Image (cartoon, rainbow, N blue to C red):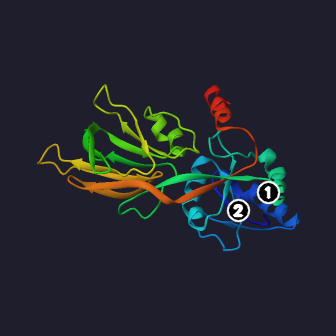
Amino acid sequence: MKNFCIITNPCKDKDFRLTNQMKSFIELKGGSCCVVEEGEEFPDTVEGALVLGGDGTLIRAAGVASFKEIPLIGVNLGHLGYLCELEEGNVYSAIEEMMRDNYIVEERMMLCGTDIAHTALNDIVISRKGVLQLVELIVSVNGLYLNAFRADGIIVATPTGSTGYSMSAGGPIIDPKARMILITPINAHDLNSKSIIIDAEDEVTIELRSRQSLKDEKVDVNVDGEFALELSAGDSITIQASEQKTKIMKLSKISFLEILRRKMQGY
């Protein structure tokens, strides 16, 4: 690999200090490097992208990178994350390894939904809006009724997203290389409501049911934390695995379980 691009979160790398140093290092070693802002298209010559910031920056970059099948590697400039393998202290040796093609690529599944333009590496979240009251969401899988959740909303997550909002809502942690879909209710008004794991080939349909006919009930649909659309009572959305996949470059042999252990121990 010789042709790189760098995607930087300017709040994490102020004045692009590390960005410019990395760009100069790559060019000094005989490679090429461009710097793009989040959401911008990559030049066709790019073979790999270095993402500076944190897990959130990498997740946002995944949407663009997956279209061109460009592998990503994260440089963590914040707290220990689950997705970013590199730190500032080892980024230059990592670049040298990538330039020698000493890396592997992991594919991570993504989600798509009806009337949603972007794919999700982490999750698609349906959540209440307006007054503080529960919404009733009817969940079907492959056209078959599963359950009616009275809750603040529902998270439909990938295995990568299992360590995000779904985990905060009480969902299980899943190895990100797995292929499955995770459905987690948010603050369900039911002591028996649990996360449900289904096959990656299944389709999940979620309908907003009207609870009070005189009220204009609505929910927001957010894709990886970004607003996508609004649903009114009677509307539904169908979510399934996308044909797009995010490619993550891996250099170290540290397993996901080792990263998880460090995170659970707070370092």
In the image, residue 189 above or below residue 76: above
**Image position of 190 with respect to 143: above or below:** above
Res 40 quadrant in image: bottom right
* Residue farthest along the left direction in this orientation: 214
What residue appears at the point 69 percent right and 38 percent down from the top-left corner? Answer: 255
Q: Residue at x 77, y 61 (%)?
A: 20
Secondary structure beneath dot 2 equals strand
Element type at mark 1: helix
- Residue placed under numbered mark 2 in the picture: 48
Q: Quadrant of residue 146?
A: top left
Between 49 and 195, the residue placed more toward the observer is 195
Task: Residue at 40%, 43% (x, y): give it.
Answer: 155
The front one of 162 and 253 is 253
Residue sitting at x 11%, y 48%: 214
The x and y percentages for residue 29 are 88, 63
Does 188 sit left or right of 27 as displayed?
left
Residue 98, labelled with which disc?
A: 1
Question: Does the residue at mark 1 contact the one at mark 2 (Cβ under 8 Å)?
Answer: yes
* 206 horizontally vs 69: left or right: left
In the displayed structure, 193 sits above or below 159; it is above
**Mark 1, residues whose alpha carbon is within 10 Å: few (<14), some, or many (≥20)?**
some
**Which residue in the rendered view is the most extreme toward the bottom?**
44
Q: Amino acid at mark 1?
A: Met
How far from the left and from the top, in percent, is residue 192? 31, 27
Q: Quadrant of the N terminus?
A: bottom right
Left or right: 214 in relation to 83:
left
User: In the visual, does 216 lie left or right of 80?
Assistant: left
